[in-house]
Amino acid sequence: MILATTTRRQIITSSAALAGAASAGFLATGAQAQTSKLRVGLMLPYTGTFAQLGVAIENGFRLALNEQGGKLGGREVEFFKVDDESEPAKGIENANKLVQRDKVDAIIGTVHSGVQMGIQKVARDSGVLSIIPNAGLGAATRALCAPNVFRTSFTNSQPTHALGPVLLAKGQKKVVWISWKYAAGDESLEGFKEGFIAGGGSIVKELGLPFPNVEFQALLTEIAALKPDAVVCFFSGGGAVKFLKDYAAAGLKGKIPLYGSGFLTEGVLEAAGSAAEGVMTTLHYADSLDTPRNKAFRLAYAKAFKMQPDVYAVQGYDAGLLLIKGANAVKGDFTKKVDLYKSMGGAVIDSPRGKWTMSKAHNPIQDIYLRVVKNGENKVLSVAAKALSDSGAGCKMG
Ligand code: BEZ
């Protein structure tokens, strides 16, 4: 029913309009003219602890489209926005607002792994094209993968996979893990364990608190008493700023080295100030990547939005690049799903993070960098993992 509605909307019925479309060079094949606007749904957090992440993703996405004159495959774009509030309980309802009410041709969303579960269900049930610009929910490109779902970010275990060997090389073998207790925290821990336990490391305590709780005090007191060699964590957005500041205020900074999945120091460096200096993380992007591509992106982003980009902006930008690639391949005709998905699945994305390719399960195969915060910037120290792919375990595209 949704498909039928979309098709009806896209067919030009008046001959005058057809003639106009022909002269504008928009015609696809035969009567399948594509002159109506493509409807793009943005389902992102615009309030709460991940609000800044949502804004950065939207900015990055719009920047990519604006570099193409604001069009997708020759068609104008109309945006529909939903603030998902990082609220998993509203995930399905919010995704359905875009699919059923707004009849979007594609959903770009979201940030939070729990909310992504809702989008994943709606995307699988409706067949609407969905691009994940952040949420690392493993299942989205493993057991629950789908031909119409693509990710331009990571699986939660990818960034932390390369972190264990970094600690082991420094002789830091006993660590405390701390994170929010939901899929992103749990799966980041899984990734960390892969590279840490096998190399002889042990996790003396796994600490957690519910998302988006930021009452860290009791847990920091416990860490001080445990005296581990290091602390490793997953936090992001407003919660990351609070954790960095509380860690320093508790007197732990400088005593017990702090490491994290790189989100800990993304988009927060100004707010966290000296509390973030010296923190080492692993991630698929770093501000200081010394490539013409990254420099040009950072300049264009800063000029357009009067702020510095971060990994979320890069992932949003890459979602735009991916959609542009698909849309160009089908000349804006999103009913040509086989060709659309084939083009997107085979994409090589020339990203500010470095070139990456799409795995069979539609997740990036990408380099992971070891970074350190120095003078308010995430500086690259080395490539911690080259062309890292996720297992895609259980993915059957059907
Ligand atoms: C997640 O929920 O998947 C997530 C949120 C913020 C940063 C990274 C991952």
Image (tube, rainbow, N blue to C red):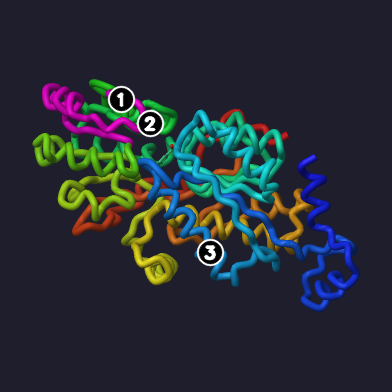
Report the image quarter containing ligand 1.
top left
Task: Decide whether residue 327 is among the magenta residues.
Answer: no
Does 344 sit above or below residue 95?
below
Does 191 sit above or below residue 105?
above
Image quadrant occupied by the C terminus: top right
Does 394 sit above or below residue 268?
above
Is 26 or 256 nearer to us in this picture?
26
Image quadrant occupied by the N terminus: top right
Label 3 residue near ligand 1, CB within 8 Å: no
The amino acid beneath tag 1 is Gly
Q: Which residue is mark 2?
A: 185
Residue 67 lies left or right of residue 158; in this view the side is: right
Dot placed on the residue nearer the N-terminal end, 1 or 2: 2
Q: Secondary structure at mark 1?
A: strand
The stretch in magenta equals: 207-234
Residue 298 lies left or right of residue 232; in this view the side is: right
